[in-house]
Image: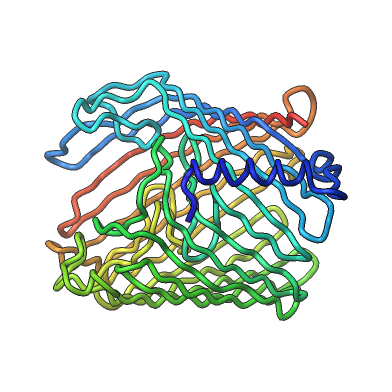
Amino acid sequence: MLNQSKTITFLASLIVTASVAPGLALANFTDDSKASLELRNMYMNRDFRQQNAARSKQEEWAQGFIFRLESGFSDGRVGFGLDAIGELGVKLDSSRDRRGTGLLPFGAHSLEPEDNYSELGLTAKLRTSQSTLRLGTLQPSLPLVMYNDSRLLPSTYSGGLLTSQELEGLTLNLGRISEINLRDSSSRDDISYAGLNSSHLDLLGGSYALTPQLSLSYYYGELENIYRQHFVGLQHTLPLGERLILRADLRYFASKDQGDSKHQAVAGIVDDGKIDNRNLNGMLTLTAGAHKIGAAYQRISGDGDFPFIGNDPYVVNLVTFNTFTKAEEDSWQLRYDYDFAALGIPGLSFMTRYISGDNAKTATVRDGREWERDTDLAYSVQSGSLKGLNLRLRNVSFRSGDGLTTDVNENRLIIGYSLPLW
């Protein structure tokens, strides 16, 4: 879609046009703008427990700075605006033999972690009625493409995305994604899957709220020369009483290869390299006051792993360390959340979950097993001079067997502070 230099030129032309066009008022452009600075300090430690591990651990500590600027829209039938995101990551502690947590990039040849890395993203936006077109840097959260915010700095994409809400209850999205800036990178790279690069991902779809409690969604996308994908989703919230709420979230993907990928074996894909995958997954969550209990199931079938771009697939068993999306894998999850506001401690929350997968298939494994246990304790200061300060302690245990050979214990400590600038 637009590369960085073209985006900057386009933004500049919009500003010049707005400044000289007669009758074009910029009051809402500035008055509705807002800016914030997020500070994120993150420590990660991975202890590898499998036999013959290449390294005994990964351990890094870094400081992140995330600046966001979001303008309003100029007055007029067609309003324009611009957004910006600036990211800076600074190494506090790491080394060549402890690299690789995803917090810091490292040299391809030296393998030394970088002292710092940064990213600047600019987004032009145009709005008419209830439709908005964004061109430039994007952070989509859609079934076919999701940005990642689980490390020091969030990932971004480049491209264009049109979002329309002209009809009540209906949200439509039409977009093309052309590049990705990974969570631990300063560069913009071609989007890819399983070792194959693609020039772009095209997507079309949306969601419709039949009632305030029930919504349906559908998306279709093509990762050029690699795969095409359909998605159907259903979300339903059912009040069961004064304090009980049952929420259902069902998702289904159908993916098939296309273009060049039909004529070559795709890296990491079992058998003959074809992509012909179905993924059915869903989660039921019961909320009872301060308690939440969830149960999820995911079934992968067909040829190959479940295909997706970036770090985050839109599946219910996407958890801290693993995605449970290997070929033929069946996985289930049990989850429990508690909000300590019920005990008079607002801002304090607890989460634990257990995920188990079996029948996983790879190029060398036919019936692999894996499981993960996550525990989170988080606190966000609610008032006073430290409002905006949040702390999270996360513990992960991951084990695999029957041919799969990754065993990990992991701890993360994240301290964040969000400061509104205006």
Residue 298 is drawn in which quadrant? bottom left
Residue depicted at 29% across the width and 75% down the height:
258
| Above-or-below relation of 408 to 317 | above
- Indicate the position of residue 167 as horizontal and vertical percent values: 75, 76
- Indicate the position of residue 314 as horizontal and vertical percent values: 47, 62
Of 22 and 399, which appears nearest the observer?
22
Residue depicted at 64% across the width and 37% down the height:
68
Horizontal side of residue 111 vs 376, given as left or right? left
What residue occupies the far bottom of the structure in this picture?
Answer: 210
Residue depicted at 55% across the width and 77% down the height:
218
Q: How is the image coloured?
A: rainbow
Of 304 and 11, which appears nearest the observer?
11
Task: Give the total number of marks visible in the rendering.
Answer: 0
Horizontal side of residue 175 vs 262, given as left or right? right
Of 255 and 32, which appears nearest the observer?
32
Horizontal side of residue 376 vs 340, given as left or right? left
| Above-or-below relation of 127 to 381 | below
- Indicate the position of residue 87 as horizontal and vertical percent values: 52, 32
Residue 94 is drawn in which quadrant? top left
| Above-or-below relation of 193 to 220 | above
Quadrant where the C terminus sits is top right
- Indicate the position of residue 250 as horizontal and vertical percent values: 53, 74
| Above-or-below relation of 269 to 65 | below
Residue depicted at 30% across the width and 30% down the height:
106
Residue 336 is drawn in which quadrant? bottom right
